[in-house]
Amino acid sequence: MSLKTGIKRDVKLLTFAVLLCSGSPCFADWNCDDWVARRGYCVDYVKSKIPSFPVPDSDDDIKQLNNKQVRDVVRGDVAIFDLGRYWHVAYVENVRRDHRGNAISIDISEKNYGPRMTPDHYLKTWGSRHGSEWKRAVWCGVTKKYGQNGMRTNVPIDTVEQIWTPRPSLSQRIRSGSVTGLLDRAREFMDGLVRFHETGS
C-alpha cells in the first residue's frame, strides 16, 4: 500500500465518510490528516465508548457491521445511519418501547452530527478565510458539530439503517460454548419486567 493510498484509507476509516461523489466534485488531492488527528468524528466518539468497535475499511465492511436486527437494539449498541454521502455512527443510550416491548425509538449520544458547515462558521470556528480550506473541511465530512458531543432523544427506529452490537448473540455464545453473562442479562430482563409491572406502564 502506497503512502497516498494509506492516507486515503485512514481518512475513510476515521471519518466514516463514504464519499459517493454524486452531485458534487471529488478532490482526490485533498488530505484530511489534520482533521483525523483532531479526533472529532463520530467514529472517534464510538471508539471512546466501545474500544472494540471495528472501524471498517470499505463500504462493504460497513454493511458487514450489521450483526443484529434493528428491532433487537439495546443500550450499549451502535446505531448506524446512512446519510447519503456519509455513514454516521452513534452510541445507543436508551431504547424506548411500545406496550408490546417493540423498540420504537432510541436516545443516542454522538459526535459530529449537525448541519453542513458554512464559510462564515468555518471562519469563526477555525479562523481561516481561505475558501478552499472550508471546501476541504466539508469534503472531509466536518460538520458544524465536529468535535462536539451531542445527544438526540426519540430518534425513530425506522431511521436506523443497521445495528452493531459488541455482545455476541445468544446463539453465537451457545455455539462457542460460552454463556458468560447470560444469567446477568436474564436478571436484567426480569428486573425490567418487575419495574414495568410496578409502574403500571
Image (cartoon, rainbow, N blue to C red):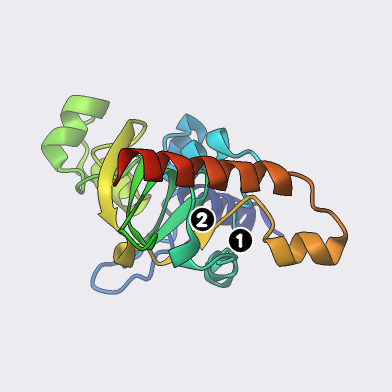
Q: Quadrant of residue 93?
A: top left
Q: Are marks 1 and 2 in contact (CB under 8 Å)?
A: yes
Q: Which image quadrant for residue 107?
A: top left
Q: Is residue 137 left or right of residue 168?
A: left
Q: Residue at x 54, y 65 (%)?
A: 62
* Front residue (pair 56, 198): 198
Q: Residue at x 58, y 54 (%)?
A: 165
Q: Is residue 196 above or below residue 13?
A: above
Earlier sequence position, callout 1 versus callout 2 = 2
Residue nearest the viewer, comparing 200 with 122: 200
Q: Position of residue 5 (x, y in %)?
A: 61, 58
How crowded is the residue under tag 2: few (<14 C-alpha within 10 Å), some, or many (20+)? many
Question: At numbered mark 2, what does the secondary structure look like: helix, strand or loop?
Answer: helix
Residue 80 visible here: yes
Q: Mark 1: which secondary structure?
A: loop
Residue at x 22%, y 27% (from the top left corner): 125
Q: CA distance from mark 1 to mark 2?
A: 7 Å
Q: Which mark is residue 12?
A: 2
Residue 57, disc: 1
* 192 with respect to 124 (left or right): right
On the image, the x and y values in percent for residue 122 come to: 21, 35
Using the image as rendered, state which of residue 102 and residue 68 is in the foreground: 102
* Pointer 1 local density, CA inside 10 Å: few below 14, some 14–19, many at least 20: some
